[in-house]
Amino acid sequence: MTQVLAPETFTPTPAVGRSNDRRWNLAFGLLLAISFNAFTLWSFGYVGQDAPRMVLITTVIFGAFMAFNIGGNDVANAFGTSVGAGTLTMKQALLVAAVFEVSGALLAGGEVTDTVKSGIVDLGASALDPMEFAYIMMAALLGGAVWLLIATRMGWPVSTTHSIIGGIIGASLATGFVTGTGGFAMVQWSEVGMIAISWVLSPALGALVAFLIYGAIKKHVLGNGLSQTLKPHMLARTSGEDHAADSEMDLERDAATSTDSTVGSHSTLQRWVPLIAAGGAVIITGMLLFKGLKNLDMSVSTVGGILIMAMIGLAVWMAVFVFAKTLRKQTVPRATYILFSWMQVFTASAFAFSHGSNDIANAIGPFAAVLDVLKTGSISSEATVPLAAMLTCGIALIAGLWFIGRKVITTVGTKLTEIHPASGFAAELAAAAVVMAASISGLPVSSTHILIGAIIGVGLVNRSANWKLMKPIAMAWIITLPAAASIGAISVLALRTFFG
């Protein structure tokens, strides 16, 4: 029988703690204040002397507030499985997010962003005054940010992109009706229908792929023994230390209860884990090439992309095989834990880079649009995203993850189902695969919804999915668009009254 490591001899680092570190709180608070003030002063020279200062300052506040809440919800969702599994502590997740999320936004986020043609609201078809357009974008930022804050406080992972779209829809319709420049015809309702389809399509695809990936890992690596099903009171637990210790115990149970002599052994790890890692590397590389780096002019052909994916896959297979051999002196559960922990760190990092290069840049598009209006005095189809704006929003994003991200991390990492490094890796890899495939095929999906579906897929394998919690989360997805639209509509009317 496989030797089982006693849980008290190896306890992973605590995962989700409370924000009681005064020095970290003070450091992030000061960093956020310094970056906000520095960017505000810089923006005065960027937009010119004729731009209304109060509008500019309000825009900076709304933009930083939006980025802050993206960190608290969207980024927290992306790192929930890693922190919940005990692979990363909260502070380590902050470091990874700071490097890869911000790097993705800065390196591959694109130098310009669409402003008028959002694909949802045709603002170019109406004769809008440039300042009216600026108010719409400002209201969209506030509408999306306020809804994200509400959802974050409730622990609901929701879509940042859908929040922004909802804010734009509400603010545009309110402005169109008040000024007589447009109405319901401004909204591309067919595109809104595609978003509604994504509410079902995204989690369904994520769940299916994760079910297949983790099912294969459980069968060939962890064994055929079933993990202990989570009880309701365990699903509500928030102690990071207890959950991290259980992460390894889950792996131990899988190996120890297996009736198959070919699983739960070092030879199994050396045979299967390098293949799994290589396949994951190919998927992650494809996601970065087709989605994460799509805004860079890399000029990589399809054949070239396939060759790059194959080379990286082979290199990862060799590296993990050698790494697995060095762990032969460890017990099988500990070796399994270590291998999948490292693999999960790489999937989380790649997912963070892809997220930063796309979702963050898209979310601050309205911010860049207002700055462009204040600088040029006109509405452009595309607006430059200043490096200073991206950096400031990146700092606000990390601060948001630290200050308000714990509830979403707890929901994603501990409450939806039991997570350990192997299941967390499977969920993240499945989400990356679906995101890549959707980007290539043009399917209307949400990366947030995909990852939540992937976690549920893992829960289906272990028969421990918390369907009771999924009900309010699914409801939050549905009301994201109308909630953000309502806040955006009220906000734009208030802005027109205040500044008009």
Image (cartoon, helix red, strand yellow):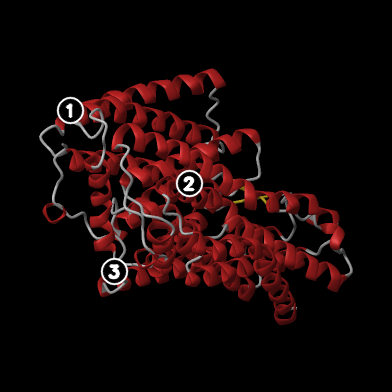
Residue 264 found in image quarter: top left
Which amino acid is tagged 1? Lys
The quadrant of the image that shows the N terminus is top left
Q: Secondary structure at mark 2?
A: helix
The quadrant of the image that shows the C terminus is bottom right
Nearer to me, 357 or 412: 412
Which residue has dot 3 on it?
24
Which amino acid is tagged 3? Trp
Q: Residue at x 84, y 73 (%)?
A: 178
Which amino acid is tagged 2? Gly
Q: Residues within 10 Å of mark 3 (few under 14, many from 20)?
A: some
Which residue has dot 1 on it?
325
For marks 1 and 2, the one nearer the N-term is 1
Nearer to me, 21 or 385: 21
Image spot of residue 85 (x, y percent):
32, 53
Q: Is residue 136 left or right of residue 396?
A: right
